[in-house]
Image (cartoon, rainbow, N blue to C red):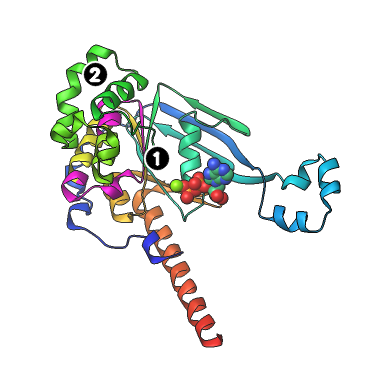
Amino acid sequence: MTEAEIDFEVDPEDLPEISDQPDVPIGGPSLVVDDLHINYRVFGGKKVGAQYGKKSWFTRLVSQSREHVGAVQTVSAIRGVSFVARHGESIGIVGTNGSGKSTLLRAVAGLIPPTKGTVHVSGEPSLLGVNAVLMRELTGERNIMIGGLALGLTPQQVRDRFDEIVDFAGIGDAVYLPMKTYSSGMSARLRFAISSFATPDILMIDEALATGDATFRQKSKARMEVVRSEAGTIFLVSHSLATVKAICTRVLWLHEGNLVMDGPSEVVADAYGRFARSKRLEAKAQRAQRRRRG
Ligand SMILES: Nc1ncnc2c1ncn2[C@@H]1O[C@H](COP(=O)(O)OP(=O)(O)O)[C@@H](O)[C@H]1O
Ligand SMILES: [Mg+2]
């Protein structure tokens, strides 16, 4: 794990302000995840070249089986995760890279089918990720319309909220330019604006906040509170533990596809912070050892 993966910096504006968190009553379940398993099938591997090297062109030609064209590998990204999320909860998801955070969100959003187990959602989830699909060739304006419709708004509702969305994203007249001309910050802000203004039942944010500056983080935090106060459920994947603690009421810690801890954000974020820190020191010691040897 590199240092860049974990953000131990605490920005003053990210500090938890318990008093400014509106008291949103926690309602009934909005999401039930039951023994969820997600496997990815990866076709072809690094071994292809090596295997070909040992076989004649004729053997390759006549053999049709997969193992000769690169093995099919299975990656178990989520290995039996269960939890219940309720209306009004904002849930942080932490874990090292590759622990399954993005996969879990994609499964909740219905973008990938469970290999085993079930995901029950009440209402329409909306996934807002760094990779959320906005179309780069189209203008911000078109993306607002398409994104809004995809999130279940009517064309009139999108038109009614258009100015507010542009204003929130702070992109001004650039909204009439193709999105490929946007900076990554502008794209991230517009993506957040589109997703959150549809006030979905479940708002999922995958590290999108990292691209925003301090002012935008504040604005998005306020916006998330609106979603939450309208009894939505929020999921936030972030490497900034300070942000997670400031925004979330509860945290899930994923490790190698397993849910290793689920509890109040302070408790889980601190436990994960200690774990991540020790991993970081371990990696540092290993690097030092390699340097001494080499
Ligand atoms: N599209 C994919 N195809 C194959 N493997 C994938 C794919 N996406 C993620 N993985 C693998 O699944 C595991 C979990 O990945 P991911 O959910 O992206 O973790 P995180 O978001 O916590 O970094 C990793 O081992 C990753 O390599
Ligand atoms: Mg991820």
**Span highlighted in magenta in the image:** 193-217
Residue toward you, 285 or 67 = 67
Q: Which residue is at the far front? A: 57
The correct choice, above or below, for 196 with respect to 276 in the image is: above
Residue 24 placement (x, y as % from top left): 26, 33
The residue singled out by tag 2 in the image is 158
In percent of width and height, residue 207 lies at: 35, 46
**Residue 177, magenta (yes or no):** no
Q: Quadrant of residue 132?
A: top left
Quadrant of image for the C terminus: bottom right
Q: Nearer the viewer, residue 25 or 235?
A: 235
| Residue marked by disc 1 | 131
Q: Is residue 76 left or right of residue 70?
A: left
- Mark 2 and mark 1 lie on one chain; the one further toward the N terminus is 1
Judging from the image, what secondary structure is the residue with disc 1 in?
A: loop
Q: Amino acid at mark 2?
A: Val
Q: Residue at x 32, y 44 (%)?
A: 208
Q: Kindly tell me whether residue 222 is visible in this rendering.
A: yes
Residue 186 pos. (x, y %): 23, 41
